[in-house]
Image (spheres, helix red, strand yellow):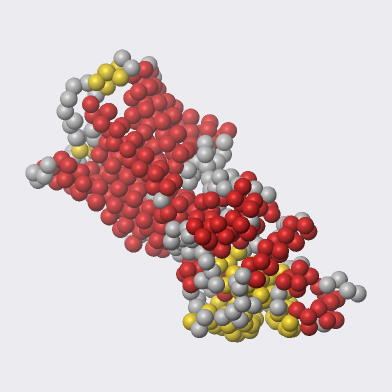
Amino acid sequence: MTANILDGIVLGLQFGLLAAGLTLVYGLGGVLNLAYGQMAVVSAIVILFSMNAGLPALPAVLAGLVVGGLAGLLLDGTILRPVYRLHGEARVLLSLLLTLGVAFIVDGFFNWRYPSAGLSLRIGGGPIRILGVPMRAGSLMASAITIVALAALFWFLRSTTLGRAVRSVIEDEEGARLVGIDPHVILRLILTLTGILAALVAVTRSMVAPVTVTAGFGLTVFALIVTVVGGLGSVTGALLAGVILGVVSTIAASEIGTFLSLIILLAAAAITILIRPSGLLGVRG
Amino acid sequence: MLDVRGVVAGYEGGDVVHDINFHVDAGEAVMIIGSNGAGKTTLFRALIGLLPMSSGTVMFEGADITGTPAHLVTRLGISFVPAERRLFPNMSVHENLSLGAYPSRPDPETMSLVMDLFPRLAERRRQRAGTMSGGEQQMLAVGRALMGQPRLLVLDEPTTGLAPKLAAEAYEALGLLCDQGLTVLLAEQQVPLAMALCDRGYVLESGVVRTEGTSAELAENPEVQRAYLGVA
């Protein structure tokens, strides 16, 4: 049981980081990015190919992070342009449809060209015992990176002028404009940042299990469930929900079976929403 | 300082204000009075860049700012306090004030000026804005606007939702700001309060400027007396 809980926390931290990206973009601009998992996959493939071409792991990972950020910037500059002209529900729906289209195209392309590609980053060293449970070095490294990334994200949002500006747009967009903040510039920045986060999730996932070309939708769905449970627009909520659902999912997978674990995850999400419609820590109702 | 000519603005359903002309000189306090639905909010939102104008021009300190988006108007030196305040409810008083100085770091001198003007805000620095009373939120909204060191402060119905005693206090604070030389433009339904503060005013009715004059002249105007001062 302890092993399952520890594994669940490892998975949950990554869920949390993934969902933080989705929830920030939604909270800021009412944009639901369903190509989010594919952004992670694109970064993973870039890292894989860079390493196959002979680049050492660290520069290859950096290249992947840069590509993740550029993917976010590219979404902002192209497919999301018409989305920004709409408001309210229409904006959410159009963003959902267009990014879903992008996701299908990216998925289709990779399945056609590189159907068996998958990124695995091997971290050397034997298992390390935590609370009496042997943990793989890869899992620990993945958790350490994720925790540092989450801490950096919290620090940015809490303690920097730009981070405060990001939160102010989530809380009241018109109020933000009145103090001199351009919501579009903030959204572009955050799309870029969340692209980097998606790439980072690909990197840390690949330390535990291979990230294949078909992993995109799975990542998006997990991020979406965690986002909804955590409350749209709340990074703390995303982290909390990520860890809870990570533990639930891992225990369910080991006690009942992998197939049913997704259903149990969805049930846990549905129950949360029935009890608290705005999620655990939702900003927008 | 502010020169508004021939402004027409409204929403998709049609124009709300028609051919509005007025001006505010440096150091003045000017009021736009009118009943609910006269178009005061629409006019201010258009001036500040929150709402597109159908026609007209707005000059600020000699520069044409017509159609400039709100976040840039703010940086030019005009701070707007809307009736709904538009605070950041889950952020602390201090964070709200700090953001008022965006994109600069908050100026410590301006911060202490705001705290001196509204000692309640100093007491509640760490409290979340959304948990404060209506009067305190109004102080915070004005304080946040002042953090941007504006040369023109524009307020839409600063007494909205305030009990009479708090409304009077809000106007006392505005009076202090005027005495320090800040230029103020405000829209108000509570005409006696605004008249006591402002040098001049314009009466807005059904989207047009019906009459204008100094506060003393308006107070003598029988129509104004009947409609806004409760004189039979």
Position in image of residue B80 (x %, y %): 58, 67
- Residue lying furthest top in this view? A132
- Tell which of A34 and A12 is nearer to you: A12
Q: State whether residue A171 appears in this view.
A: no
Position in image of residue A15 (x %, y %): 37, 36
Q: Residue at x 68, y 70 (%)?
A: B187
B200 with respect to A1 (left or right)? right
B135 lies above or below A220: below
B189 lies above or below A271: below
Determine which quarter of the picture holds residue A74: bottom left
Determine which quarter of the picture holds residue B41: bottom right
Position in image of residue A83 (x %, y %): 43, 60
- Tell which of A90 and A177 is nearer to you: A177
A91 lies above or below A23: below
- Tell which of B230 and A99 is nearer to you: B230
Q: Could you tell me how many numbered marks the image carries?
A: 0
Q: Residue at x 36, y 56 (%)?
A: A189
B146 with respect to B72 (left or right)? right
Quarter of the picture containing the N terminus of chain A is: top left
Position in image of residue A62 (x %, y %): 21, 46
Q: Residue at x 42, y 25 (%)?
A: A248
Determine which quarter of the picture holds residue A154: top left
- Residue lying furthest left in this view? A54
- Residue lying furthest right in this view? B232
Q: Residue at x 32, y 45 (%)?
A: A197
Q: State whether residue B82 appears in this view.
A: yes
